[in-house]
Image (cartoon, grey):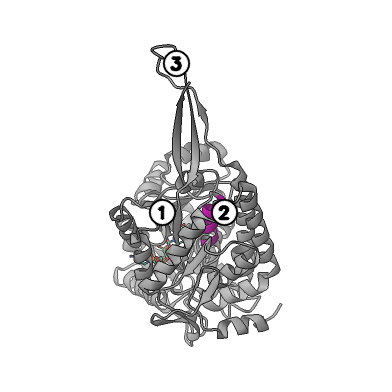
Amino acid sequence: MAVVSLLPQVEAFLARQHGHFIDGKAVAGSGARIAVVNPATGAPIASIADATSEEVDAAVASSRRAFHGAWAKTTPAERGNFLLRLADLFSQNREELAQIETSQSGKIIQISRAFEVDQAVNFLRYYAGAATRINGETITPSLPSFNGERYSAFTRREPVGVVVGIVPWNFSIMIAVWKFASALATGCTSIIKASEFTPLTMLRIAELATEAGLPDGVLNVVCGGGDAGRQLIAHSGTNKVSFTGSVPTGIAVGRSAMEAKLTRATLELGGKNSVGFLPDVDADTAVAGILEAGFVHQGQVCAAGERFFIHRSRIDETLEKLSQALATLKIGDPMDEETQFGPLSNQAHFDKINQFFRQARSEGDEVVYGGESLEGPGYFVKPTVIRVTDAGASLLNEETFGPVATFYAYDDEEELLRLFNDTPYGLSASLWTSDLSKALNYVPRIEAGTVWVNMHTFLDPAVPFGGAKASGIGREFGSAFINDYTELKSVIIRH
Ligand code: NAD
């Protein structure tokens, strides 16, 4: 175990002039340059170009050609095989992709390898299999015939068209894979609008896709900020947007999509996810659960827990043990294989989290652990534990999207249920207890797209994922994604 040195091919990749990937080729881009910064040092490591309207037009034209041309001619099995070949190339280039990701996002290298690459491979393989299982149904029409004629009916699942995938900065590979693999499996073509903070991995993945034999234009990558996303949604040549990001941006995206002639929209948004421990859970088990729920990738996980509810009889001991555990976390260089906790992913987010620390103090919350940034370069903060005594406290209700776990003591189990649901959001929740019968009584009453029991942030490609309430519209994974990437066509035949 050691500090990882960048592979020569990663250094060469970072040194290139990056822009977009359109119609099978890397394009330098003629728009304003946007620096890509290593959050562990604060130093620029590369730059990309903000998309111009000509580049957006070129990407959309290329995607439409591929949708009606080469991609339309492929069979479901061929589309699945393409995704399998890409999965193999991910594995063969695992270290290169992981190092690019850690360099641009500050994700610790072990998580870049295990989640961004290996988990993305699992998703690619899952979607490859799904490509051959996208079917309509046969239906017996219900109305009587008047003159002895008969009717037969069936439905077809047809690809919705050119799908724009808009991706946040926290999982630049995995979330992009969710979007383009869904699109490709259903026969759509995909344009990924990478995050301006973490655009580099997708540019390399598009090259791997070409190496895997994907026809030009089936997967394009457009870089830039929110305006590039807006242009893609508003473009008459795109048919759907699949967005993952914050709630306010998601609302703006949904509005733009509706205004652009009802462009289809799937919105995977943020939230303020609840984690509740019943009194039977001892402090050591709770601490392990809190670390799993709240601190992976410095809390920058959409499904991470941020609202923690612990029974009053257990909370003091649990917070004491949690503080001890956090004090042993090795914070530092994300390229060091022994590091357990890296920097926040960008300056804006670092500023936002520091503002939450100030807010907690100014509102009289108890900062049990952390609540400060670290001296030196890079966007490092301490993992933080806040205790509030008012269920209306800001820190218990506003998404921080960082390593800020806020705790509240509850007294009875009906109160716990109210606390779970007393939020406008509903992406995920977890309940911890060894009493399975109690857990199963809670599950239907918790308002969230995913409820985990005795675990947190476990995403499986076979299990649908998405937000209830203000955490989104639509579902990814499972077979649920098929609804969102296809149009259902009904066919009725008189005979
Ligand atoms: P963000 O909403 O700021 O940006 C997301 C993406 O949208 C970026 O690519 C950005 O350039 C683009 N964008 C910005 N304005 C746009 C506009 N008007 N039109 C079109 N595109 C626009 O989110 P972020 O800061 O990158 O990511 C953090 C947020 O994402 C958190 O709120 C987190 O909870 C959420 N998130 C949700 C999930 C999920 O699956 N539900 C997963 C990861 C992150």
Q: Which mark is residue 149?
A: 3
Q: Amino acid at mark 1?
A: Lys
Residue nearer the viewer, 460 or 75 = 75
Q: Name the front one of labels 3 and 1.
A: 3
Q: Is residue 322 above or below residue 186?
A: below
Question: How far apart are the two marked residues, 3 and 1, measured between alpha carbons?
Answer: 39 Å
Is residue 179 within the magenta segment? yes
Please report the bounds of the magenta region as a residue range: 176-185
Residue nearer the viewer, 59 or 127 = 59
The mark that comes first in sequence, 3 or 1, is 3
Q: Name the front one of labels 2 and 3.
A: 3
For numbered disc 2, what is the local secondary structure?
loop
What is the x, y in percent for residue 253? Answer: 34, 59
Label 2 sits on residue: 458
Residue 331 visible in image: no
Q: Amino acid at mark 3?
A: Glu
Q: Is residue 129 above or below residue 363?
A: above
Residue nearer the viewer, 192 or 267 = 192
At a point 57% along the width and 53% down the height, the residue shown is 458
| Residue at the outermost top position | 147
Q: Amino acid at mark 2?
A: Phe
**What is the crowding at mark 2: few (fewer than 14 residues within 10 Å), some, or many (at least 20)?**
few
Label 1 sits on residue: 240
Is residue 219 within the magenta segment? no
Give the main secondary structure, helix, strand or loop, of the magenta stretch.
helix
What is the x, y in percent for residue 221? Answer: 49, 68
Question: How far apart are the two marked residues, 2 and 3, measured between alpha carbons?
Answer: 53 Å
Disc 3 to disc 1: CB gap under 8 Å? no
Q: Quadrant of ligand 1?
A: bottom left
For numbered disc 1, what is the local secondary structure?
strand
